[in-house]
Amino acid sequence: MSESRSALATIADAARLLAPCRRLLVLSGAGLSADAGVPTFRCEGGLWNEYDVEKLASPEGFAKNPELVWEWYRERRLRVAEAKPHSGQRALALLQEHFPGGTVLMATTNEDDLLERSGISQVIHLHGSLFDTACSGHCGWRSRDGDDNSLSMVPCPRCGAPTRPGSVWYGEPLPAGILQAITHFDPDGCLLVGSSCIVQPVACIPSEMAMAKLAVVEVNREETPFSPIASCSLRGTAKELLPGLVDLLTSRTVREQLHRGT
Ligand SMILES: [Zn+2]
């Protein structure tokens, strides 16, 4: 009982910090999708346990064994297609639509399409999309693949090089202009969900905001390297915590009360 009272108090604290924001950045990572049953990149289950994902998801890994990498991606595409958005992701869609007097920008390191399927528009995919197929050469061709992964089976239609998954791999730069899109939004608050924030350059976004004394609220089931500098950390899953937090933030009356400190 006391545990549930303290969890509610913490959600109110988080809402109080975010209530004055006008341009809220929601930055999400693997923990958000894990709640929907999508295996996290850093701890894949089942058949892929024996492989080092950092080697598979790299230009070198693809050059060494393209079929193995494609097999892994096709299986991930299938598992994501079978997953459904959960209450935490649907709550974020409500937040984007009903945040009174402000705008919400969604950015994620997740490559799945669960945020879009929750009803969120204009998701910035910092690490690309799981469903994109791209040229492994240098011609710049990329396209959304179909349910049958047909584009993964044929050479690049522009230059004839083999196709590869369109994700951003370890050691590769982010798509051009993607971090600038967040800078241009100029967020005055950040909700960091299910992200351990250990991969640069994405990790610098909430860190710089925290150093500038802007509100950064972390939602994570465990402590992360970012926790010590977060304005407030909520311990638990996005599925458990986001519906309550969004409920407070989307009520104009509650937001005004929180803002006044009553
Ligand atoms: Zn090409």
Image (cartoon, rainbow, N blue to C red):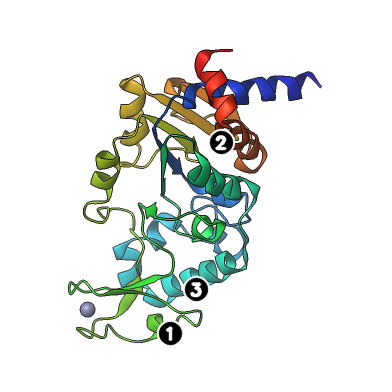
Measured as percent of width and height from the top left, residue 42 is found at: 49, 50
Count the numbered circles shown.
3
Residue drawn at (55%, 30%) of the image: 252
Query: Camera-side residue: 222 or 146?
Result: 146
Determine the image quadrant of residue 7. Answer: top right
In the image, 8: left or right of 89?
right
Q: Which quadrant holds the N terminus?
A: top right
Amino acid type indicated by mark 2? Thr
Q: Residue at x 45, y 53 (%)?
A: 110
Whole-Å distance between the Cαs marked 3 and 2? 38 Å
Please state which of the two labelled residues, at mark 3 or mark 2, is closer to the viewer.
2
Q: Viewer-proximal residue, 122 or 86?
A: 122
Mark 1, secondary structure of its residue: helix
Residue drawn at point x = 50 percent, y = 19 percent? 259
Determine crowd level at label 1: few under 14, some 14-19, many 20+ residues with C-alpha closer than 10 A: few
Residue at x-position 54% and y-position 26%: 255
> Which one is in front, 57 or 245?
245
* Residue at far right of view: 1
Q: Position of residue 233 (x, y in %)?
A: 54, 25
| Residue hosting label 3 | 74
Q: What is the number of the mark on residue 250?
A: 2
- The image shows residue 51, relative to residue 150, as above or below, that is above
Pointer 1 residue: 150
Where 133 sits versus 51, above or below?
below
